[in-house]
Image (cartoon, helix red, strand yellow):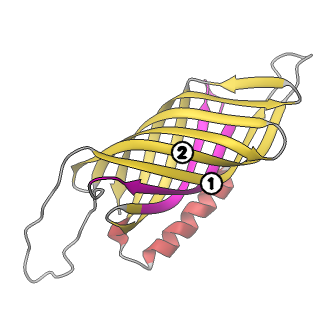
Amino acid sequence: MWPLSMIASILFFCFGALAESSNIRFVGSLGIGSAGAENEGVVKTEEPLALGFSTEYSMSSRFTIGFEHNRSWKGTKSNIGATGFAARWYLWTPHAQDLKNPSDQIEETVILQKGYIPYLGASVGFAQSSLPRLTENGRDVSVAKAYVSGKAGFESPLFGPWGWRSELNWAEGIVGDGRLRMVHIFFGLYYFL
């Protein structure tokens, strides 16, 4: 799934480059929680850490779309991942934006709104697990499925193009053999291009 995520991010970046680049942001997060998979009656989990990466494009002051990749992480291993298309809707206030002055003749006043900006979101895509056997008599748990994910969180600008985000993310496999679930709370930073 890593190559698919990288290809999706590159394509999204190239598409976004046609628009104003200040509408694109990269997000990197570290999370806590649990991910698990079941196949043929064998259940395995991976916890307590997770990694999350996304590229987002601001469609308006209240709505973003993008690609994301989330992975569970235990020790030096990461065996459960999900890559998909995500959308976020900002409930009461506009999300942080890095608005650039297109004219270099006169500098205009810049307004920086700081506060906690709540949002709801969803994503769809493909998830996979490849949890290896723990003993010689054990079995691998390999699952590949389509998934849906719900998310809710807060974000706030820090300074310049930087900001922070906190998000609860619940992903559930829906189509395919076996079962797969990821539940994480992510804490991360975003950066506008």
Q: Secondary structure at mark 2?
A: strand
Is 59 drawn above or below residue 145 in the view shown? below
* Residue 181 in the image: above or below residue 110: above
Task: Tell me the tag on residue 150.
Answer: 2
Determine the residue positioned at 62% across, 55% down.
5
| Residue at left offset 17%, top offset 82% | 103
Do we see residue 79 in this rendering?
no
Residue 20 lies in magenta, yes or no? no
Residue kind at label 2, given as amino acid type: Gly
Front residue (pair 114, 189): 114
Nearer-N-terminus badge (1/2) = 1
Where does the magenta region start and end?
64-92
Q: Secondary structure at mark 1?
A: strand
Residue 69: in magenta span:
yes
In this view of the protein, which residue sits in the foreground, 38 or 187? 38
Q: Position of residue 89 (x, y in %)?
A: 41, 56
* Quadrant position of the C terminus in the picture: bottom left
Secondary structure that dominates the magenta span: strand
How busy is the neighbourhood of tag 2: few (under 14 within 10 Å), some, or many (20 plus)? some
Question: Residue shown at 34%/53% (left/top)?
Answer: 91
The single residue placed furthest to the front in the displayed view is 92
Q: Indicate the position of residue 3 as horizontal and vertical percent values.
A: 67, 55
- Kind of residue indicated by mark 1: Val
Which label number is shown at residue 124? 1
Residue 54 horizontal/vertical position (percent):
49, 53
Residue 36 position within the rendered picture, expressed as x and y whole percent measured from the top left: 69, 29
Q: In the figure, is residue 85 to the left or right of 119?
A: right
